Amino acid sequence: MRLRPQRRTLVVWRQSAGSAGRYGARRLTRGRRIRRWLRTGALLTVVALMHLAGAVRARWRPLLAGAVLTAGGAMLRGGPYSVILLPGLMLLLSAPLVPARAKPDRVRRSELERELAGYSTPAQRRDLEAILDQYPDEITHELREILAGQAADAHGTVPGHGPVLRAMGRY
């Protein structure tokens, strides 16, 4: 057995715990700080765009989402987040396929939604659903769709499916 030689010229190429600042706290390097700001900025941008998507018509929603995902996928091309490029392109290509509703249809539907919002108590809803059950679904499907959407907005759930995100276009 021999003694180990003294290591006087020990060089640390990479510190595993990060640089320690004052009082032993970790100090973020410039790259980490920039990445953190980029992630925070991207998150705030997504939140703002979701609010914007609530105001945009149904035909423009896939176009807006596709543009955001495609731009994000193009910017993050080298990393694992480049996978969002393909869904973005698919949304961009599918946006022209969404049928546009005419303005009179939108006005009629918004008036119908306002009128149906008057049925707010569970007893009133049951009475309205009992009346709707007397007619075929081909006639009442729009009313049932509006009522289901209002119920989901009021409770934050889809009946029979549990909680849902409110960021899906309805607030």
Image: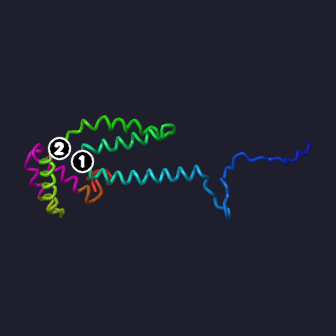
**Residue that label 1 marks:** 57
Is residue 28 shown in magenta? Answer: no
Position above or below: 171 against 57: below
**What residue lies at 37% left-to-right and 39% top-to-bottom?**
88
Secondary structure type for disc 2: loop
Q: Which amino acid does label 1 sit on?
A: Arg
Q: Where is residue 62 in the image (x, y as percent from the top left)?
A: 30, 42
Q: Is the magenta stretch mostly helix, strand or loop?
A: helix
Between 129 and 83, the one lying in front of the other is 83
**What residue lies at 26% left-to-right and 55% top-to-bottom?**
152
> Where does the C terminus fall, quadrant-wise?
bottom left
Marking on residue 101: 2
Nearest to N terminus: mark 1 or mark 2 = 1
Crowd band around label 1 with a 10 angstrom C-alpha radius: few (<14), some (14–19), many (20+): few
Q: Where is residue 96 in the image (x, y as percent from the top left)?
A: 25, 36
Between 150 and 59, the one lying in front of the other is 59
Residue 84 quadrant: top left
Q: Position of residue 23 (x, y in %)?
A: 67, 65
**What residue lies at 13% left-to-right and 54% top-to-bottom?**
112
Decide: marks 1, 2 in contact (CB < 8 A)?
Answer: yes
Q: What residue type is labelled 2?
A: Arg
**What residue lies at 24% left-to-right and 45% top-to-bottom?**
58
> Does 18 sit left or right of 73 as displayed?
right
Secondary structure type for disc 1: loop
> Where does the N terminus fall, quadrant-wise?
top right
Magenta range is 128-150
Report the Cα–Cα distance between label 1 and label 2. Answer: 9 Å
Q: Where is residue 82 in the image (x, y as percent from the top left)?
A: 46, 38
Q: How is the image coloured?
A: rainbow
